Amino acid sequence: MLTLSLLRHAKSSWSDARLRDFERPLNERGESAAPRMAAFMARRGLLPDLVLCSPAVRARQTLRLMLPYFEKAPRVAYDDALYLASPGMLLKLIRTAAAPVRHTMVVGHDPGLHMLAVELAGSGCGNDLEALAQKLPTAGLAVIAFHAGAWAEVHRGDGRLKLLMTPKRLP
């Protein structure tokens, strides 16, 4: 079984209009949400072997705030193709993960990340599927399981949404 965690970057700041979108940092709310989500993941044993992260400032900051909560440091790969990537590009990058990686996490952006989560989750709890169809908020986490033996075998609709968590729903 393979596990895919799709995490939208935490809330970013729009306060400096001079910054390009790629350069926008996290705001205070984002700086608070990222470690809270990481602590939740750690408590639930959702610890990735590999993290594919957008190189945008807000995505890198999100991941940097999360890494201290992971018992074992995952391998991290920053890829320019993840910045504002389409669902198809995201899936292509995910499919490149190789054994022994069993849990991959993607830290990325809307709308591509949200669209991919909806496309991959063919089953799961009805309430969570409905909520996911509506939105993947900032610092939102969708965890999808696949009965595939290799990442190259992951296809749209084959996943089961195991968990949808948002900062507002955190215990």
Image (tube, rainbow, N blue to C red):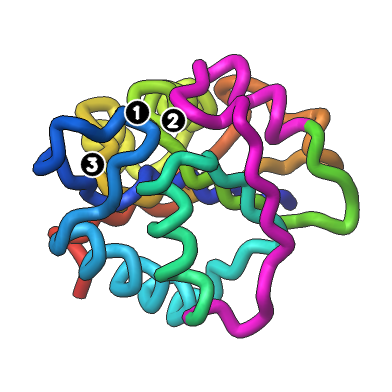
The image quadrant that residue 80 belongs to is top right
Residue at image coords 70%, 23%: 92
Q: Is residue 55 magenta?
A: no
Tag 1: amino acid: Asp
Seen from this angle, which residue lies furthest right? 99
Q: Amino acid at mark 3?
A: Pro
Task: Return the x and y of residue 62 as percentages of the image width and height.
Answer: 39, 58
What mark, if any, has residue 137 been given in the picture?
3
Work out whether residue 90 or residue 81 is closer to the camera in this orientation and state it.
Answer: 81
Res. 110 mark: 1
Q: Hey, which residue is sitting farthest front in the picture?
A: 18
| Residue drawn where x is 38% and y is 51% of the image | 141
Mark 1 nearby-residue class (10 Å; few <14, some 14–19, many ≥20): some
Q: Which residue is mark 2?
A: 113
Magenta span of residues: 69-95
Question: From the viewer's perspective, is residue 118 above or below residue 68?
Answer: above
Question: Mark 3 falls on what kind of element?
Answer: loop
> Could you classify mark 2 by the number of other residues whose Cα lies within 10 Å: few (under 14), some (14-19), or many (20 or more)?
many
Residue 32 tag number: none
